[in-house]
Image (cartoon, rainbow, N blue to C red):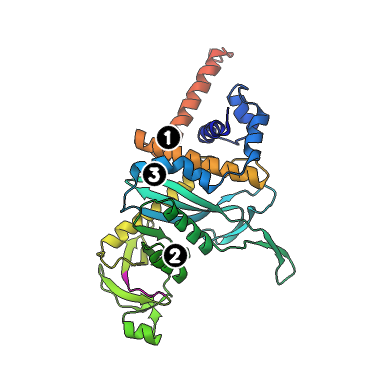
Amino acid sequence: MNDNELLDIYSDYLISAFGLTTATGLSELLGGAVSHDRIQRFLARRELTAADLWRLVKPHVRAVQSDSSVLIVDDSIAEKPYTDENDIVCWHYDHAKDRTIKGINFLTVMYHAQGVSLPVGFALVAKTEHYLDKEGKPKRRSPGSKNDYYQQLTQQALTHQIPFKYVLHDVWYASADNLMFVKHTLHKEFIMPLKANRKVTLRLADKRAGRYVRVDTLVLAPQTVREVYLEQVDVPLLLAKQVFENEDGSTGLQYLVTSDTTLSYDDIPTLYRKRWNVEPYHKSLKQNASLEKSPTQTVRTQTNHFVAALCADIKLELLKGATKLNHFALKSKLYVRALQTAFVALRDLQPVRLAA
């Protein structure tokens, strides 16, 4: 059995498992056909990379690709509170929780085409540099920023000749440098939200004079777009003020800008809504592909487990198309089947009956 076959088996195991995923557990599941040591050697031998992921996902991308598709870039943290700290398992600030948490911070570039969402590249934030903070406490940091990873991942997608029209991301990647990179280096369009304090102007003359105002001070008619100029961005953009109702009944407000000046107001939020496909991906990766359930201890084995979890997610996404069931419904179906098998096995043992 070669490593490709083991990766296939291991990623199936990550989908079918409901608890901790270990080499011993997989070996027992296979009835000893593959030894515990063989699985450990597979995880420790060669560190899998984004190139390996692309080799595996490429035929599935080619099956759905179109020139009007989108790339989605986002990051998340796989929590590893009980794992020893190393270059990739370390402390990261989580914007959603507004605190630092211990785990693996990863970025994904996702390709969304024809209703299918596939990870086509990734980066693990490795904090390899050690330093002392102002209080003399030892800290770690990455030699590159998340914006560096953003540009590397989107450029990689272009190098792989993945056709797409728009790059979508959240407000954390909305730096002027990233927007200029998408427009002038990738020669693609972007749609992204702005923080309320970003500086814009409605007139080119004001831009040239450096006269900007906060975006939240602009008076914008509902369901309309305005051409604006963003500070440090050299192309005109369309700005849409989106007002929506949150699940709790409160009103939400979002300023969306795009470099595609041909879009209507309705087009902008409709296209940007595709970015939300990355949210269930993060959740499914952790809950359905066992990303956080491995006891691996080294950077190499943790990286290989991460890539295997991405492979598991790809399998779930392809099964979703074949079965019309989402990832969570598929996992639930497996769980019910496992319970049925366990129940039948128990009845076959003919345990003592307690009924009178």
Q: Residue 203: x and y, percent? A: 31, 82
Q: Considering the numbered disc 3 on the image, is that residue within a helix, a strand or a loop?
A: helix
Magenta span of residues: 233-239
Q: Residue at x 52, y 43 (%)?
A: 52
User: In this rendering, would 128 be left or right of 188?
Assistant: right
Tell me how far mark 2 sits from mark 1, CA to CA: 32 Å
> Helix or strand or loop: what does disc 1 sit on?
helix
Q: Residue at x 34, y 47 (%)?
A: 65
As displayed, is residue 84 above or below residue 11? below
Identify residue type, mark 1: Leu
**Mark 3 neighbour class, 10 Å CA radius: few under 14, some 14 to 19, many 20 or more:** many
Residue 120 in view: yes
Q: Earlier in the sequence, mark 3 or mark 1?
A: 3
Between 351 and 89, the one nearer to me in the picture:
89
Q: Secondary structure at mark 2?
A: helix
Report whether 91 appears left or right of 205.
Answer: right
Tell me the quarter of the image containing the N terminus.
top right
Tell me: 44 left or right of 234: right
Q: In whole angstroms, how far apart are the C-alphas of marks 3 and 1?
A: 22 Å
Residue 61 is tagged as 3
Q: Earlier in the sequence, mark 2 or mark 3?
A: 3
The kind of residue on which mark 3 rests is Val
How many numbered marks have been drawn onto this rendered protein structure?
3
Disc 2 marks which amino acid?
A: Val
Q: Give coordinates of residue 338: x percent, y percent.
A: 50, 26
Please tell me which residue lies in front, 163 or 87: 163
Q: Which of these two is toward me, 302 or 133?
A: 302
Residue behind mark 2: 171
| Alpha-carbon span between mark 2 and mark 3 | 27 Å
* Residue 178 image point, x, y percent: 45, 66
- Measuring from the top left, give residue 352's x and y in whole percent: 59, 13
Q: Is residue 192 magenta?
A: no
